[in-house]
Amino acid sequence: MLALGCSAEEAHRLADVQSALGQSFGSESEPNGTPPNATPIAKDGVVRATVIPNGDQDLFSFPGVAGERVYAATMTALSPGSSDTVLELLAPDGSSVIETDNDDGSVGASSSSSIAGATLTQAGTHFLRVRQPAGNATIRPYDLHLKTQAEAPVAETEPNDLAIMANPLPVSGWVSGTIGVGTDVDIYSLALNAGDTVFASLDLDPERDGTELGGALSLGPFGGTFVPVNDPGNTGPDSEAAVVTVKAAGTYGVAVSGTAASTGNYRLSVSVHPAAVPANCTTYSSAPGAVVAIPTGPAVVTSTIEVPGHPRIADLDVSLTLSHAHLPDLDVVLQSPAGSVVGLFTDVGAAGFPDVDITLDDEAALPVGALHVLSGMSMTPEASYRLDWLDGQDAGGTWTLRIADDAAGNGGALTSWSITVCEPAPPPKCAAGDSPTTLFETDFEDGDDGFTHSGALDAWERGTPAQEPSFVDCNSGTSCFKTNLTGNYEDSSMQDLVSPPIDLAGFEAPARVSWAMKYQMENATFDHAFVDVREVGGLSPTRLFEHTGATMTVTVGNGPPVTLQEVAGWGIYTADVSAYAGKNVELVFHLDSDAMGGVTSTFPGVAVDDVKVTACPTPACGNGSVEGTEECDDGNTTSGDGCSEGCVLEAQTGTGGSGGSSGASTGGSASTGGSAGSSGSTTSGGGGTGGASPGGTGAVSAGGTAGSTTGGPDTGGAANDVVIVGGGFACNMPGNDRSRAPWAATLAVLGLGLLRLRRRAA
């Protein structure tokens, strides 16, 4: 038997795709704290990242040219931890600071950062570094916006003080202007689609001469007004930044204004991040005309929506239209059919702005409460709440919106509301039509199935949870693991639940892990939960899930106030682990807690059920040899399957026996297939491989009759240059010097037998 290979294996990198209705984010890839492993960021893009653990710093890389201007800002208002960043623009050497900022940013948090108009002085890869100033707190998460400008800005045209006189923004989104008197306002208009996110960055010292305009930045109209964004500024070149996601298509404006005591020049950069295209999403609305009165408080009203069937949640958004005489009195909470409670907002808005017309979306630019106007925008829930606590759950059933009015003397009405459920994208398929193989699966009904647990104050138990009100069941059956089946985890714990080894040898992408999980945790500043995959023994861990939110409770109402337990109910979580194909891995479900005592310092923790790992079999020929996945460079084939799949070849012998082993010498002869059997009745194994050594010549004898093939005219072919006749196979690998002559002119094989190309069926 003779096996010959024609190609190298190609790496597959497949990631999970999640539907989203808001802006489309890039994501960081940890570790990214040094220039060699910096995460790339688009020159007109946004990433959502975290500073975790304390002391973490993130570097993002982008190409730049001399003279290019950089506009960048962090949005930190969504973090329930620290919202304080330092943003640094670094030169290509990865250490020289071109410009830095601590507190100029005003996109929802006065301690966020903004750099506007910094000039690059050389070509090369530049870096943006994000860190927490003291290094003793986490930021969970922040958004980093970037826009670079290379040409010249377009000068404003006066008058443009009113919306009807606004200058249309140029295609570049880059303009320059002057605030000449304290009452001057410059407005620039742009057309937006529903779900678009605007990033506006205002450079108040474009000459970098230390003379700064005391300017302000506004976006609008929202709720009939422009929303101002301004802060006191910081040492160094002052700037302002603003982001917003619009709820509806229309014409919007960006306004620059000054103060009575300050005039001067500015440069404004505006970029638009289009909404991600919804995939497999359905909107379910409250009954038309079913207005719900909100009486003067203290009072609680509810409204319901019925979702038919069993759609699985990959992303969920909530839209609200209501009015109230004093919005800061309202607490709004959503409850899923399974009883999971998620806060949306409590005591936000401002007197004088009674109308709410928003979509709450985890992928929006700003959290509700960051601005005093709650109309015409898509916003995330408040920083203490996350809609992704509902991800993975079954959306079928009755959804309940609960509105609590804290105080007497004011009333209002809920006009309508809706939820939009986006279902998961279909999982990626295996190559060549193969089906994924289940490598490990357990529902814990018959035992621990190899899972072990350990650590300080380890409370992992298998059984049926019995902790009222929310932890009283498993995702399936009556047995699952939980950190204490009947109560909370303890303070000062450090505990791991570890799967048995799962062997991915002989398998390739896409490799996926799924598990069912329910959890309720204290603020991730104090207590932590995460899921990792790693090589057996602890090497090369990758984080698949991490709790990064606030304490999972919400207090609503005032008659008396009621504390509701927010729970991420049984959801199916999936992650791509293709980077571990071919390795022996294990899953780790981790929880740790700080030493702070008290009634509310610990929570029910984490429950796990229905763990499954799948991967695609590595394609192989019938002889069991591994099949490659990279196409030959010329795709040259004859009557057989050819080499487009790179399948390893096997020669079948006839009655006389098969060829011998290969021989090679520099400048001499080389034979792959060797001499035929003595009877002369044999299959030659596919002939010689000329060019296996520089200048070599291959020869094959079949029944005493020789054919030959010759190596390349210069240095010979590459070592894996293969030409086969009889099975319809001919190809040249990159790097050889052989002219690509037809196979018939290259090799002739005489004798009896059969060469077959066999590939495992799908």
Image: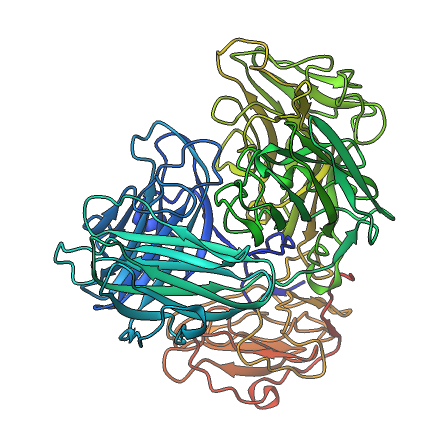
* Residue 522 locus on image (x, y percent): 56, 23
Along the viewing direction, whichever of 16 and 685 lies nearer the viewer:
16
Residue extending farthest to the left is: 209
* Residue 249 locus on image (x, y percent): 59, 67
Q: Residue at x 69, y 53 (%)?
A: 617
Task: Determine whether 269 is above or below 518 in the image.
Answer: below
Along the viewing direction, whichever of 655 and 586 lies nearer the viewer:
586
Residue 41 visible to the viewer? no
Q: Quadrant of residue 745?
A: bottom right
* Residue 439 locus on image (x, y percent): 72, 41
The quadrant of the rendering that contains the C terminus is bottom right
Q: Is residue 536 left or right of residue 570?
A: left
Task: Determine whether 442 is above or below 321 in the image.
Answer: above
Give the total number of marks visible in the rendering.
0
Q: Is residue 544 left or right of residue 320?
A: left
Residue extending farthest to the front is: 409
* Residue 665 locus on image (x, y percent): 41, 69
Q: Is residue 389 left or right of residue 106?
A: right
The quadrant of the rendering that contains the N terminus is bottom right
